[in-house]
Amino acid sequence: MIDDERVLAIVPARGGSKGLLGKNGRPLLGKPLLAWPVSAARSARCIDRIIVSTDDDSLAAIARAAGAEVPFMRPPALAGDCASSAEVVIHALDFLVESGDSFGYVVLLEPTSPLTEGCDIDAALSRLHGARDRADSIVGVVRSETEHPAFAVSMSSDGTICPLAGGRFESLPRRQDLSPAYRLEGSLYASEVNAFRRNGSFCHQRTMGFPVPRYKSFEVDDLLDFVCIEAVASRLDELRPGPGPRNGEKP
């Protein structure tokens, strides 16, 4: 809870996956991928209720074992490739309202971004709540360094390349002269509930960015991503800038 506003955490976890089969239940350092965001939400001070939206019985069992609720099974219409995260969030909010429960804020935590920690959730919600005069939502962003858009190129059918923004390679700026650029990443999304219903998205004109360190921005889409994240997760104590509890550990 923040002031008198209750906070709901939703973890979406459908059974189907094309990039990496069964990824939401796949063990990451011995803990199912789905259990990582549940652990993060449990360690966050601001979260009042944690639910997992899934269409899969085995994932529902993992969610409950990790400490989340599964108050409904996601309908088939919201379990395919074409279903959006916004539809999943609205479905969950509507279900809870019909059961007599309502919230001021909603947080979406994807299993594919397992390195988010409870302290990140608390910090993001605190920042959003303190900026309600200019923002209704906050989403994770990461600074683009080696992937700065100024160095993006297009490639023609004959294999030759040119700067995507136009001009000549000789006119590209030096890396140290570039203004900071950020990209959206999937570690966390949060919004005031009524604003989310109005906009149907976490990203709009009143959205703040919540910068996260690069090591927390890795997302699982395929096996290579999973291998990289497992390597990162095994060395969090070296990567974390200061002392603090590991993901899922109570402070």
Image: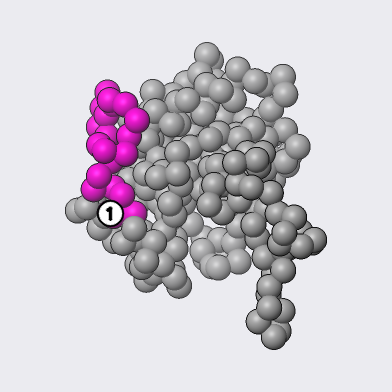
Tell me the kind of residue under disc 1: Ala
Q: Residue at x 47, y 25 (%)?
A: 123
Specify the principal SS of the magenta part.
loop
Q: Residue at x 75, y 55 (%)?
A: 171
- Residue beneath label 1, please? 231
Q: Nearer the viewer, residue 49 or 112?
A: 112
Label 1: state its secondary structure. Answer: helix
**Is residue 135 something one can see in this rendering?**
yes
Name the side, left or right, on which 64 lies relative to 145.
left
Name the side, left or right, on which 119 lies relative to 208.
left
Q: Is residue 239 magenta?
A: yes
Q: Position of residue 200 (x, y in %)?
A: 69, 45
Q: Within 10 Å of the Cα at label 1, are there few (<14), some (14-19), or many (20+) other Cα atoms?
A: few
Q: Is residue 135 magenta?
A: no
Residue at the outermost top position: 3
Q: Position of residue 35 (x, y in %)?
A: 31, 47
The magenta span reads: 229-251
Q: Is residue 39 above or below residue 245?
A: below
Q: Nearer the viewer, residue 46 or 89?
A: 46
Q: Position of residue 218 (x, y in %)?
A: 43, 51
Q: Quadrant of the C terminus?
A: top left
Residue 69, picture quadrant:
top left
Residue at the outermost left position: 30
